[in-house]
Image (spheres, rainbow, N blue to C red):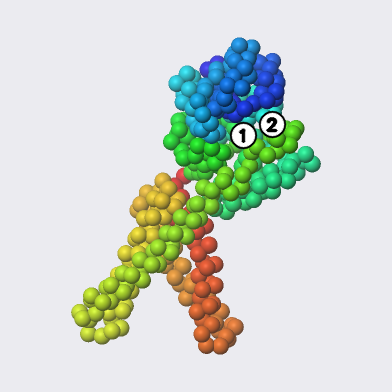
Amino acid sequence: MQDYRAIPVIIPSLEPDERLPRLLAEMREAGIENIVLVDDGSGPDYAPVFERAQREFGCTVLRHAVNLGKGRALKTAFNHCLNTWPNAPGAITADSDGQHSAADILRFMEELAAHPDSLLLGCRNFDDAGVPFNSRWGNKITCFMFKALCGVSVSDTQTGLRGIPTAFMARLMNVPGERFEFESNMLIETRDRLPIRELSIQTIYDSKENHSSHFHPLRDSARIYAIFGRFLFASMSASVLDLALFSLFLLLLSPLFAGRTQAVFFCTALARLLSASYNYYINHRVVFHSQAGHRRAAMRYVLLATVQMLASAGLVSLATSLLCPPGGWEILIKAVVDIVLFFVSFQIQREFVYKKKA
């Protein structure tokens, strides 16, 4: 593809208003050639808008018979672009509600041609006076959670203006998410796979309807919190498994040992080995979806588990000696220490144990 203006621009749309034809006219005036419009089940009342887009602005219109969600609309367009322009560096996505200017879209096309191996994100200034409260604080919260739980640091998680490389676009066809959560899932999918380049864009909010159409904190951030939820489940289920195996082994193997102490030690070690193996496997495959090799990750997991065990024992002993609490407080101190180590362990496993070697 010789001219970056030929890079396809994808615009998913549901029940568009006058802002869509205005954006299409501006894009044509800017020399943008290939516009792929997805009618996500808008219904017959909106057919004239899409017919005009085809007739007057030369858009390719892909249609869903019913509303399937923004994620599905993007995947429908990705499939079309991959088949129609297989040699393009990628595609640009933009919203139909007037939030993105033709000038910014054109700049993204040029940047994608220059950086075809990066995901481009259009970042708005959320400190502008015109930004609605739910978008401003919703974005701040989600950015923090993305960094803390997913290790993905961006300044605008909600942006619909993106430049998506061809190879990554093909991968996104199999990423979960049919509605707005797909855009969050897209960011998570970049981890350890390709860099993110953030570009400043105009911050445009021109109506109350526009304000309410994008961010839904609980729904759109579900997968972010699910990562930590899976980690919590893996840890708790490993603890239950450890206790169950210890009880079973103690019941079955005690007669084989001369003393109770030896039996308890052996059964504890065997149960911990099996429960730790389970925990490692679940974290590797289910929680972090790690691309790291098992040998490297397993060695780091053993190292972390050893350090964590020693840290727990050392901190509990230190806190007990310094605070000199009355008898019985050791259990409370250990609970507090282990909770802190639990969160530290999550970060270390994400960034060290299961992270793919660069």
Label 1 near label 2: C-beta < 8 Å? yes
* Residue tagged 1: 160
Nearer the observer, 213 or 196 = 213
Which residue is depicted at the point 39% across and 55% down? 282
- Residue at the (54%, 34%) spot, across then down: 69
Q: What residue type is labelled 2?
A: Gln
Label 2 Cα neighbours within 10 Å, binned few <14 / some 14-19 / many ≥20: many
Tell me if residue 295 comes above or below residue 78 in the rendering: below
Quadrant of residue 258 within the rendered picture: bottom left
Residue extending furthest toward the top: 55
In the rendered structure, find residue 211 and report the number of the disc placed on it: none
Q: Position of residue 43 (x, y in %)?
A: 57, 25
Amino acid type at image mark 1: Gly
Please determine whether, in this image, residue 199 is positioned above or below residue 337.
above
Q: Nearer the viewer, residue 194 or 333?
A: 333
Number of marks: 2
Residue 70 screen position, x and y as percent: 55, 33
Q: Badge 1 local density, few (<14 within 10 Å), some, or many (20+)? A: many
The residue most toward the right is 129
- Distance Cα–Cα, label 2 vs label 1: 9 Å
Residue 99 is labelled as 2
Disc 1 element: loop
